[in-house]
Amino acid sequence: MPVAGELSQELTELLFANIPLGIGFSVADAQGIVRFWAGEGFSSCSPKLIGRSLYDAHPKRVHAAIESLLADLKSGRKDEVDTTEQNDSGAERIISTALRAADGTYRGVLETVVPVAAAAPLGGRERPPSRAAIASQQRSAGSRAGQPAHSSTATPFQKAT
């Protein structure tokens, strides 16, 4: 993904404070040390976890799963692990993505936490369609029905406009 420009610390904080849909993010470095978290998915986390091991941020019952996940990401066997978990506040989709330098060197892990709507199917295996796929489907449907292609700009996460 192309990235250009720079953000100040203030703009970075505002960006993450205003991510829609209750999404949360955390980043741990290549040594498994938590360096950053933001968003609703981490509202129960203590700032004291910054600078500590990923294992300190998770219950012992999931340590073996974290170890396996990190081994897969570090080795390159996987670049992303996508799961769905149930907790007291409902279901959450947890996407763990390897952060790699331009030369492929493992630099850490991004954990993205997305609340799953009660009506959404669980399983964590399927991704919602991309905006491009939705636009293509809408163009196809619109041309078949004689409607303009821009009749709706809804994504799976938005109301139709």
Image (spheres, rainbow, N blue to C red):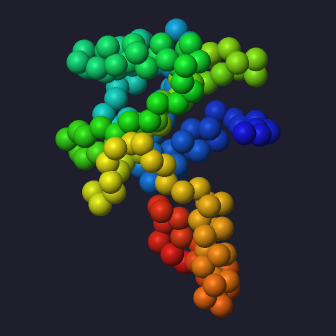
User: Front-most of 112 and 151?
Assistant: 151
Residue at position x 40%, y 15% in the image: 68
Q: Percent position (x, y) of residue 83? A: 38, 36
Direction from residue 6 to residue 60 in the image, left or right: left
Whether residue 102 is visible to the viewer of this picture, yes or no, is: yes
Question: Is residue 57 rendered to the left or right of residue 3?
Answer: left
Asked if 106 appears above or below 160 in the picture, the reply is above
| Percent position of residue 82, x then y | 44, 36
Is residue 75 or residue 105 the one in the foreground? Answer: 75
Specify the quadrant that holds the C terminus.
Answer: bottom right
Seen in the picture, residue 31 relative to 18 is either above or below; the reply is above
**Residue 107 at x, y percent in the picture:** 62, 16
Q: Which quarter of the rendered picture does the N terminus lie within?
A: top right
Answer above or below: position of 82 versus 107. Answer: below
Which residue is pictured at 31% across the width and 15% down the height? 63
The reply, left or right, for residue 120 in relation to residue 25 is left
Q: Residue at x 55, y 19 (%)?
A: 77
Q: Which quarter of the picture shows residue 154? A: bottom right
Image quarter for residue 62? top left
Q: Nearer the viewer, residue 39 or 127?
A: 127
Residue 94, percent across and down? 41, 36
Res. 150 visible in picture: no
Horizontal side of residue 22 vs 144, given as left or right: left
